[in-house]
Image: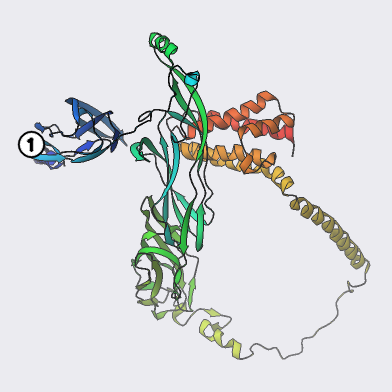
Amino acid sequence: MKGFLRRLAAVAAVLLLLPAAAEAQPVTFDVNAPRVVAVGEIFRVEYVADAEPEGFDAPAFEGVDVLAGPTLSTSKSISIVNGNMTKETRYTYTYVLQGNAEGEIELPAARITVKGKSYSAGPVRIQVLNETGSAGAGGASVPAAGSQSSERAVLAPDDIVVRAEVDKRTVYKGEPVRVTYKLYRRVPLNLENAKFPSYDGFWAQQLNVDGYAPQREELNGKIYDAHVIREDLLFPQQAGTLTIDPLELSVVAQIVMQSRRQSLIDDFFGGPNIQEVRRRVASKPVTITVRDLPAGAPASFSGAVGDFSLEAVNPTSQVAANSAFTLTLKLSGSGNLPQVQAPKLELPASFEQYNVKTTESLNNTAQGIYGYRQFEYPAIARVAGEYDLPPVEFTYFNPRQRTYETLRVPGGRLTVLPDSTNVAANGPVLGGVSKEEIQILGRDIRFIHLDDPHLRRSGRLFFASGWYFLGVALLLAAFAGAYVWLRKVLRDRSNSVLVKGKRANKVALLRFRAAERHMNDNNPRGFYEEMLKALWGYMGDKLNIPASNLTKENVRDELLKRGISAETAQRYIAIIGECEYAQYAPAVTGRMNELYTAGVEIVSKLEGIIGK
């Protein structure tokens, strides 16, 4: 009975605390609005709260026309992760506005009241641009109706632009540079193919851009929909002037066709005529000036660049002889952490030290690589006694301060106790001599046998016998065979085209296995990337097509020249196209197994026809 009363009291306490916990949850109130609009363009401004407002104070809009609003809408979502259910409700006040004058307008802050507390969102600044002589945001240049070219798709040179943006132009060796590739478009388009730069002279780390939403941005006086298609952290590995090669894209733009005689037909049948126009666009090369690190680096510097801290994890003060123990150092901070080497740890001569084990936890962000690397130094103390462990120093270059900074973990006193057999009290014994005494062997001669050795001849000599000459003949024959074989191998290896052709199938199979691992881990990005490497790489190696000429048309032509049927060649190109489409369409993930099977089968089929 007492237990039941205690449980009842606990449940009542939880129920009483629930309202207080609900009140403690913070309320968020944000505003969503475009940063750039065109004169006369109609746009929306949304004020979003995650709690039900008791009142809404609308801002006083000036410089824009309010066409509609505020309109209140409510949305609810439920998510279940690892058995935990999360409910979310959003309340959105929407305005439909129109800017009619060029310049910058400021939308004042809006306010809501939730449980007696006031929350604000804003103010927001919006740039209104006058795009004279253009088709407006999201459109394409179209010739005057009624002319002979009014029924032809016209795509202005600046309707699709690719730019490479870097956060720094001058850095030190090892200091990260963030490069962002943006696609600016004023027309609807589909991405057909992409050729990414190789980053010669850099160590690159790709960042995740899946969560980046398209933004409206102004470029050269025009408004574009800007998409971040790739973002990388680049760590320069050498001093001097390094060039970031262009990013090349093949896109298919969709142009709305409408002439005078077509307009009535389009209105009747429900839509205009759309024509596809292919275009190849590329970003401009970007040069980065890389400074060499200053001279006079301390001996403990091994190339670390960034901002770090060093600490000893659970330092050991007492161990038993002949038993293993571990000294652990943890390096935390930001910089070129993946390339940082373990600090040097010098232990006394009576310690056996083994290879360093490294564990890490890194977070790749737009600001750099953050996290830690933990270094474990396994060792065994063989001789009992008291030992003073030396301090550990680690030096890194701080690009902000432009100086070398040395971190120091102080040494300590380590007590090594004798083991259970007490053998290690004076050190282990080897042949009656302790380890401490073995160090004297270099100064004297020991264990010289002075008695009569009683040596005598036993059996016949092997030299000049029949077996001896037979062995010499076999060795000479083996040498001649090895010489002929090595000459053939060297001749084949000197022919890079032949070597690449022979290894094409093996390299493709390795990449297919990597794609299969990504498929089993449900990693579509890694799966399609490895599939494309396998398919394109096999064609380049097998058909000896340079990377600069590796296109679908060239692959199709080379396959037809080698007696491959047009149906098989087209199937190979179709598989590449499906992988490229799925790579840039994250929602398409259900056909990984089908594409994997088709890719392996068609490469095996081509390998059997083309030959090795």
Picture coordinates of residue 592 (x, y %)? Answer: 51, 31
Viewer-side residue, 183 vs 173: 183
286 horizontally vs 133: left or right: right
Identified at 40% across, 32% down, the residue is: 186
Picture coordinates of residue 359 (x, y %)? Answer: 42, 57
**Quadrant in which residue 116 is drawn:** top left
User: Is residue 439 at least partly visible in the picture?
Assistant: yes
Picture coordinates of residue 269 (x, y %)? Answer: 41, 9
Picture coordinates of residue 131 (x, y %)? Answer: 34, 33
Q: Is residue 158 above or below residue 388?
A: above
Identified at 54% across, 54% down, the residue is: 200
Q: Is residue 267 above or below residue 324?
A: above
Mark 1 is on which residue type?
A: Lys
Image quarter in which the C terminus is found? top right
Q: Which residue is mark 1?
A: 115
52 horizontally vs 393: left or right: left
**Quadrant in which residue 128 is drawn:** top left
Number of callouts? 1
- Furthest residue toward left: 116
Image quarter in which the N terminus is found? top left
User: Is residue 93 at least partly visible in the picture?
Assistant: no
576 horizontally vs 161: left or right: right
Identified at 47% across, 67% down, the residue is: 292
Colour mapping used in the image:
rainbow
Q: Residues within 10 Å of mark 1 (few under 14, many from 20)?
A: few
**Quadrant in which residue 335 is drawn:** bottom left
Q: Secondary structure at mark 1?
A: loop
